[in-house]
Amino acid sequence: MQHDSNPPQAADGSHTDVGNHADIGIHTDVGNHAGVVSRTTLTVRGYHLDGYGHVNNARYLEFYEEGRWEFMLAHLDLAALKREGIAMVAVNLNLDWHYPATVHDELVITTRLAELGRRKMIMRQEIHLGERRMGEVHPRSGALVSRADFTFVLMNTDTGRAMPLDGEIGALLGALVSEETA
């Protein structure tokens, strides 16, 4: 799998961890107020397919998870969150399929933090067909394959209870929110 996450960038385009708040595990880009979108690219393999020759529905959960890991590794200090006793826990999933992906399709997974509430946040993800299939231009390049909304809470690992998304952690997560369509 090839990963193409968009880590924070300085004004000159170089990557930076300016605004790294390691004490609570959030990396932010001080100059970016529009949030962030992460992109991950992978290629469909034969073992991803079901008996009908298209990607098995359960594999999409794995593809989306790969995209979320890229987003989180680029923008969150997971070790610091763990030290602070904070876990990011999925509590709901809504997933729609639009077009079947097949073997050798290049898939582009976009991930963004779309909403931030008092106790929950929603990561919105989409999978589109990439530009290539086996070195050739894909005739349906850009077609929407699937869309998913994952709802998460931050959980205090000592109490097992959801934490409010306010104060410093709320402000830092708020800097990651992107209204851009994935």
Image: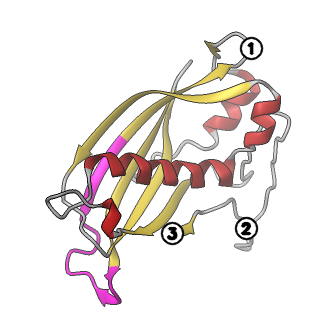
Name the disc covering residue 1, or none.
Answer: 3
Decide which of 151, 59 is in the foreground and name it: 59
- What residue sits 50% from the left and 54% below the top? 67
Q: Position of residue 152 (x, y in %)?
A: 51, 29
Disc 2 from disc 1: Cα separation: 40 Å
Compared with 19, 12 (above or below) is below
Is residue 107 found left or right of 11 in the rendered image?
left
| CA neighbours of label 3 inside 10 A, class few (<14), some (14 to 19), many (20+) | few
Q: Which residues are magenta?
A: 132-148
Q: Is residue 43 above or below residue 136?
A: above
Disc 2 is placed on an element classified as loop
What residue sits right under mark 2 in the picture?
Answer: 11
Residue 107 location in percent, x, y?
A: 37, 67
> Identity of the amino acid at label 2?
Ala
Residue 145 lies within the magenta run: yes
> Residue 156's image quarter?
top right
Residue at image position (39%, 45%) is 61
Colour setting: secondary structure
Closer to us: 46 or 12 = 46
Q: Residues within 10 Å of mark 1 (few under 14, many from 20)?
A: few
**143 left or right of 11?**
left
Q: SS class of the residue under badge 3?
A: loop
Q: Counting residues from the N terminus, which is met first, the one under dot 3 or under dot 2?
A: 3
Instruction: Name the residue that disc number 1 marks.
Output: 158
Amino acid identity at mark 3: Met
Dot label at residue 41:
none
Asked if labels 3 and 1 touch by Cβ distance under 8 angstroms, the answer is: no
- Which residue type carries mark 1? Asp
